[in-house]
Amino acid sequence: MILNLNKKENLYCPICKEKLIIDGTIRYIDCCNTTNISDKYICKNNKCYLYNNSYWNDYGDYFSLNHISFEKKFGHTKYAALNSFAKKIEIEIYKKGLKDKTYLSPLLTLLWLKPYIEHNYKADKWGNILKKTYKLKFLKKQKDSKEYNIYYISGIKMFFFSLKQFKIKYKKYLNNKTENIIYEIYNEFNDNWDKRNYKKLYKKYIKIRYFHIINNIKKEYNFYKKLNKYRYKKITENDFNELLKICPNNINLIYKLKNISASGKILDNFIRKEKLLAIL
Ligand SMILES: [Zn+2]
């Protein structure tokens, strides 16, 4: 289907409802600071108070120097032309003359959150409201302020976002248990600096939902933490036995130590000893 961009729909005066008449062109600056040229529409009904003082563009946007005095005098705020896109957004976006939120009882105000209901509308090009929907939202108090003035991103949303991130890390962990990945996943449920409510809930959830692997991760984490002490330090037989006790089954301690430790000769002795034990 080829859209006929030249085909224009008739626009109508929002007050007297008469068809608007094209009378020359206008230049106007839109919301993106671009200059546009459009047909100029006017109301030719001399009994209408928008006669001779107002005009509209192709989209139905209203232009007049008098609109503030009109609003005061006639109590009317919706001047976008009827049968226009501007009429639709006057309701859906600007919610002109409509309720945009309802604050709930102060009794429902949580310590740090103030709930309110946001009203949303779907409208047609004639300004008829087709659908009304409601959304529960929260305002948050700014630090050291008595006012609730920050839009609060629901903790539930953040909770699910964190969970998604965790699943990515978990998958990585299952595929490749490197030291870094183990530190990363361990910190997901053990760091204590983040006291936000959703984060506390998230950590609790992870510990319950993934309890079967939490112990392994903890073991691996503790092992690596201890192992790292020997990065630049010689190891004694006691140290070795300690490490062996906490070494998870899937990790080859001697191999790891050989890679990080300065204890070459001592390790060789251990290896020999182990081999001897194996033969015996
Ligand atoms: Zn009119």
Image (cartoon, grey):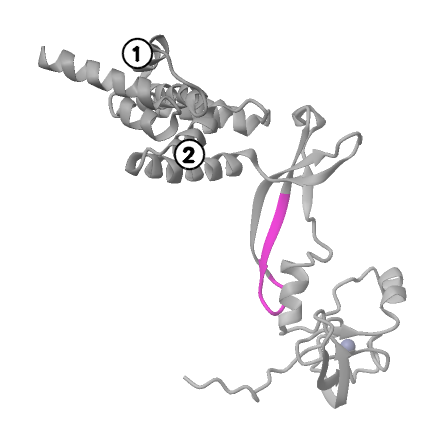
Q: Nearer the viewer, residue 17 or 136?
A: 136
In the picture, measured across the screen, residue 110 lies left or right of residue 259, that is right
Q: Nearer the viewer, residue 158 or 65?
A: 158
Left or right: 246 in relation to 87: left
Q: In which quarter of the image is the N terminus?
A: bottom left
Q: Which residue lies furthest to the front in this view?
A: 265
The answer to whether 125 is drawn above or below residue 269 in the figure is: below
Residue 26 is labelled as: none
At which x and y percent is residue 111? 68, 24
Q: Does the residue labelled 2 lie within 8 Å of ligand 1?
A: no
Between 70 and 5, which is closer to the camera in this rendering? 5
From the viewer's perspective, is residue 125 above or below residue 135?
below
Residue bearing mark 1: 245
**Residue that sits furthest to the top in the current view:** 238
Q: Does the magenta stretch include residue 121?
A: yes
In the rendered view, tell whether residue 188 sits above or below residue 12.
above
Residue extent of the magenta highlight: 118-128
Q: Is residue 248 in sight in this rendering?
A: no
Which amino acid type is marked by label 1? Lys
Q: Residues within 10 Å of mark 2 (few under 14, many from 20)?
A: few
Q: What residue type is labelled 2?
A: Asn
